[in-house]
Image: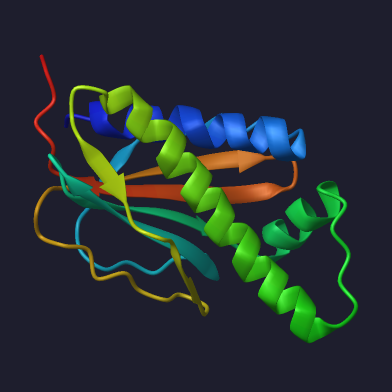
Amino acid sequence: MDTRAIEPFAAAIRDVFKQMFNLDAAMASPRVVDGPEDHEWEISGILGLAGAGQGIVAVRLPIRLVDELLKASGVETKDEQERKATVSGLVGEITNIVAGNAIAAFSSLELDISPPVVVKGKNHQISWPKIAPVISQRFSTPAGDFELGLCFNAKLGA
């Protein structure tokens, strides 16, 4: 299994969690996702990659972790409706920053990123494109676990 494509995204997400939330994110080994699977993630930030390579990157988290991230960043909301909107905004922004920072590692490729989309719901499913294997990497922090998913078909050097 070639996991080189996920490495810049994994480094970027670890940096985001450290810099924005002062959380160390320990990585598990990457694995190939083979079809739909049940999971505990309740919210996902999903973003498209286009240009010399195409793909999808997803940051998947439980809501309780996102609430902890909001707290760690000092963000307060006045009611439940504002909290839900802020949660979605934070997940979208994390996904956007991770993808933006990661594509710098692919400087030989011209890549663009789409605006992130946030999907909510217990055990929601992502219909990954059939353009490349889907690589998943789980991360653990003191505030909770999350997952990074990537389906990316760029030609990487040896």
Q: How is the image coloured?
A: rainbow
| Horizontal side of residue 8 vs 59, given as left or right | left
Query: In the rendered image, which quarter contains the N terminus?
Result: top left
The residue under the point 68% across, 67% down is: 87
Residue 58, picture quadrant: bottom left
- Residue 153: percent from left, percent from top: 13, 43
| Above or below, comparing residue 124 to residue 147 in the picture | below
Query: In the rendered image, which quarter contains the C terminus?
Result: top left
| Horizontal side of residue 158 vs 36, given as left or right | left
Numbered disc total: 0
The residue under the point 60% across, 49% down is: 145
Res 29 visible: no
| Horizontal side of residue 10 vs 5, given as left or right | right
Res 156 visible: yes
| Above or below, comparing residue 90 to residue 14 in the picture | below
The residue under the point 53% across, 60% down is: 92
| Horizontal side of residue 93 vs 67, given as left or right | left
The residue under the point 86% across, 71% down is: 77
- Residue 147: percent from left, percent from top: 47, 49
> Residue reaching furthest top?
158
- Residue 12: percent from left, percent from top: 49, 32
- Residue 5: percent from left, percent from top: 25, 32
| Above or below, comparing residue 126 to residue 73 in the picture | below
Residue 99, picture quadrant: top left
